[in-house]
């Protein structure tokens, strides 16, 4: 089977490329050319014909990923399926299934059956959990078991995988020589791989046998997302030598993977101060040849626990503005607990708002919806306004619960309404495209 990047290089337009073009309002040839260059990846899976086709990369809308999954403390399959459906209902573009508790094969397969979203995972989670269960020691992980597991998971229907290929003995040495970190290590898969290398004295097999990883991904035309296993877990660790060493290796591997015909994406941090976000994205784009960039938040402060969906939305808006292509949501439960249904809902909503803010800055020609919303609000056309809102049902509920006496205003101002008074003064002066479509000026 040929991958999307191989088809694109052969100048073949695939149904997936055409679907992305329709969804994004760009030409199919634009999508094909960017896929060929490795600047767009397409999440699909040959065994999931019902799955939504999602394009990620240059010139496309910034996408939102929602993560779910069990833990060793809370393992409720029904709850995870419910959260997967909530994420899709709220408008997430992709889903990561990150369970570490319970029957991991069953959980993955049932989540895949419950959603039409492209689903990804981190194979090291199951690899180390099953090794620990069998041998009472995760350091006894057999690399052959890891590769067999990656193929088993891909065969189930995963469209992308975060695989920690960029960790090697050189990056670990950077951690030691810089005196470790203020915030420690934040990546579960990455940290367990570091511990495995330290215990065995061996090189990371995912780095050592990178061509084998790419071969497995190509077999299912899956996206290889180069995991950020040494990402900073605190803003004071942002862009330290260890993180930068892994980033350089991941960008190099992205280029090698593309040459092999594999769809490649690079993962980023993490915890990043606001003033460093633009530089981080510029570095990834420059070093990787504009490979799609998947960032985790990012969180620009470390003191927002309980409201980290808001903290991360600030980072996400800035990341989208400067060129990030896929943003992993953060929920209010981040750093505190396993997210519940409402956490998932709020996390997706906050991140959708954030990427919209970033996208209309990144693509100024895509602001028409904002203009139409503003004019509908000016004219008190409440039903028209709802059509342009990201969350119309929520807006309708708030207005209904606190309904005004007069339908042409709201209870924020009542009869002391700036919009209403402004229209009285300037109604006859409204002209050109400031007149809403279908509405006649007085």
Image (cartoon, rainbow, N blue to C red):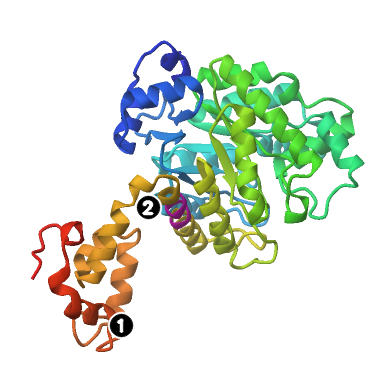
Is residue 184 in the magenta section? Answer: no
SS label for mark 1: loop
User: Image check: 251 left or right of 397?
Assistant: right
Q: Residues within 10 Å of mark 1 (few under 14, many from 20)?
A: few
- In the depicted structure, whether residue 423 falls above or below residue 292: below
The spot of residue 186 in percent (x, y) is: 73, 49
Task: Tell me the magenta residue range.
Answer: 353-358
Q: Residue at x 67, y 57 (%)?
A: 73
- Mark 1 lies on residue: 402
- Residue extending farthest to the front is 429
Q: Closer to the N terminus: mark 1 or mark 2?
A: 2
Please identify, in this view, whether the residue under mark 1 or under mark 2 is nearer the observer: 1
Q: Residue 356 colored magenta?
A: yes
Q: Quadrant of residue 300?
A: bottom right
Q: Tell me the quadrant of the picture where the C terminus can be found.
A: bottom left
> In this view of the protein, which residue sits in the foreground, 366 or 387?
366
Residue 330 sits in quarter: bottom right
Is the magenta region chiefly helix, strand or loop?
helix
Percent position of residue 42, x then y? 44, 29
Distance from Cα at disc 1 to Cα at disc 2: 26 Å
Q: Label 2 belongs to which residue?
A: 89
Who is closer to the viewer here, 42 or 190? 42
């Amino acid at each position: 089977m040929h991958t999307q990047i191989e088809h694109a290089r052969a100048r073949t337009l695939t149904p997936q490329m055409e679907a992305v073009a329709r969804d994004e309002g760009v030409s199919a040839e634009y999508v094909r050319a960017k896929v060929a260059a490795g600047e767009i990846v397409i999440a699909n899976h040959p065994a999931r014909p019902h799955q939504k086709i999602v394009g990620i990369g240059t010139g496309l809308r910034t996408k939102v990923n929602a993560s779910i999954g069990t833990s060793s403390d809370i393992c409720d399959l029904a709850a995870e399926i419910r959260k997967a459906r909530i994420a899709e209902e709220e408008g997430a573009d992709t889903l990561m299934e990150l369970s570490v508790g319970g029957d991991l094969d069953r959980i993955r397969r049932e989540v895949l059956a419950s959603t039409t979203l492209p689903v990804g995972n981190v194979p090291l989670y199951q690899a180390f959990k099953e090794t620990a269960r069998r041998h009472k020691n995760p350091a006894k992980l057999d690399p052959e078991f890891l590769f067999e597991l990656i193929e088993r998971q891909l065969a189930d229907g995963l469209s992308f995988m975060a695989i920690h290929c960029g960790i090697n003995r050189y990056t670990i040495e950077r951690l030691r020589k810089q005196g470790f970190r203020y915030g420690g290590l934040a990546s579960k898969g990455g940290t367990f791989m570091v511990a495995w290398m330290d215990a065995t004295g061996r090189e990371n097999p995912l780095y050592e046998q990178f061509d084998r990883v790419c071969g497995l991904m190509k077999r299912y035309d899956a996206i290889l997302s180069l995991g950020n296993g040494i990402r900073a877990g605190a803003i004071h660790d942002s862009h330290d030598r260890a993180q930068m060493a892994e980033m350089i290796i991941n960008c190099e591997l992205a280029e090698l993977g593309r040459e092999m015909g594999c769809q490649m994406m690079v993962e980023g941090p993490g915890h990043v101060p606001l003033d460093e976000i633009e530089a981080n994205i510029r570095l990834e784009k420059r070093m990787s040849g504009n490979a799609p960039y998947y960032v985790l938040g990012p969180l620009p402060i470390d003191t927002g626990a309980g409201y980290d969906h808001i903290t991360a939305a600030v980072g996400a808006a800035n990341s989208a503005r400067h060129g990030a292509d896929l943003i992993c949501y953060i929920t209010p439960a981040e750093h505190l607990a396993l997210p519940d249904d409402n956490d998932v809902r709020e996390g997706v909503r906050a991140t959708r708002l954030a990427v919209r803010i970033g996208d209309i800055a990144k693509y100024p020609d895509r602001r028409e919806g904002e203009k139409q919303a503003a004019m509908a609000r000016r004219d008190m056309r409440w039903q028209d306004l709802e059509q342009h809102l990201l969350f119309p049902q929520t807006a309708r509920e708030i207005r209904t619960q606190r309904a005004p006496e007069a339908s042409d205003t709201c209870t924020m101002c009542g009869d002391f309404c700036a919009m209403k008074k402004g229209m009285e003064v300037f109604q006859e002066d409204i002209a050109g495209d400031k007149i809403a479509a279908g509405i006649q000026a007085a």
